[in-house]
Image (cartoon, helix red, strand yellow):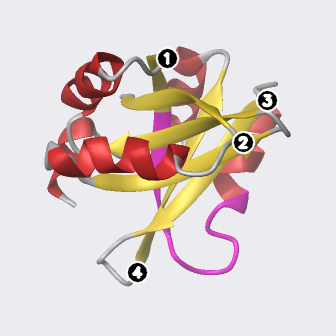
Amino acid sequence: MTIKQLSIFVENKPGRLAEITGILADEHIDIRAVCVADTREFGILRLIVDDPESAAKRVKAHDCTCTLSEVLVLRIDDQPGGLAGPMKMLSAVGISVEYMYAFVSKDKDAAYVIFKVEDIAKAVETLQQGGVRLASQEEIRAL
C-alpha cells in the first residue's frame, strides 16, 4: 500500500515556493504534508496532496520539473515510542529509510509518517506482519 508523492525541483530564489503553492491553491489542491530539502541553489519540494495526479499535471503545465513517486505512509499512535517500533522492524530486516517527514492529523491520537525506502514491497510486508497500519491514498484524500 503506497501513496503518491509529488517531488518538485525548485530554484532557491524568492517567490518560487509562493508560485508553486499558488498554482496548487488555484486548482483547489489540498496539501497534507510538506518537506523541503535544499542546497544554496535549488531544493526538492516534496508534497503529499489530496489529488497527486492533478497536482503533477498543473505544476508541469507551469514549466516546473515534477515527478510522482511511491512512498509509504504509516499511521502511528501519537505517543512517545510510536515511531520506534516500525523503525526497529525495518532495521531488523535490513531496510534503510532514505528520508522521512511527518504530519499530525485531526485525530489527536494519530500521526502520519511518510518515508521512502528502496524495497517498498519488503517494507510493506514487514510492517503489515508487525501490525503497523499503512495509510491508503483514499485515507490521505479524506483527511
Q: Depth check: 108 or 102 in front?
A: 102
Contact check, label 4 and label 2, Cβ < 8 Å: no
Q: Which residue is mark 3?
A: 96
Q: Is residue 121 above or below residue 33?
A: above
Residue 132 visible within the image: no
Q: Which residue is mark 4?
A: 109
Which residue does the image show at 63% across and 15% down from the upper left?
Answer: 119
Secondary structure under badge 4? loop
Residue range highlighted in magenta: 72-84
Give the distance between the C-alpha atoms of the residues marked 2 and 3, in whole angstroms.
19 Å
Give the distance between the C-alpha atoms of the residues marked 4 and 2, in whole angstroms.
28 Å
Give the distance between the C-alpha atoms of the residues marked 1 and 3, in whole angstroms.
27 Å
Q: Which kind of residue does numbered mark 4 sit on? A: Asp
> Residue 37 shows which numbered tag?
2
Q: Depth check: 31 or 116 in front?
A: 31
Disc 4 vs disc 2: which is toward the camera? Answer: 2
Secondary structure under badge 2? strand
Q: Is residue 82 above or below residue 70?
A: below
> Residue 65 shows which numbered tag?
1
Compare marks 2 and 3 and give the one earlier in the sequence: 2
Q: Which kind of residue does numbered mark 3 sit on? A: Ser
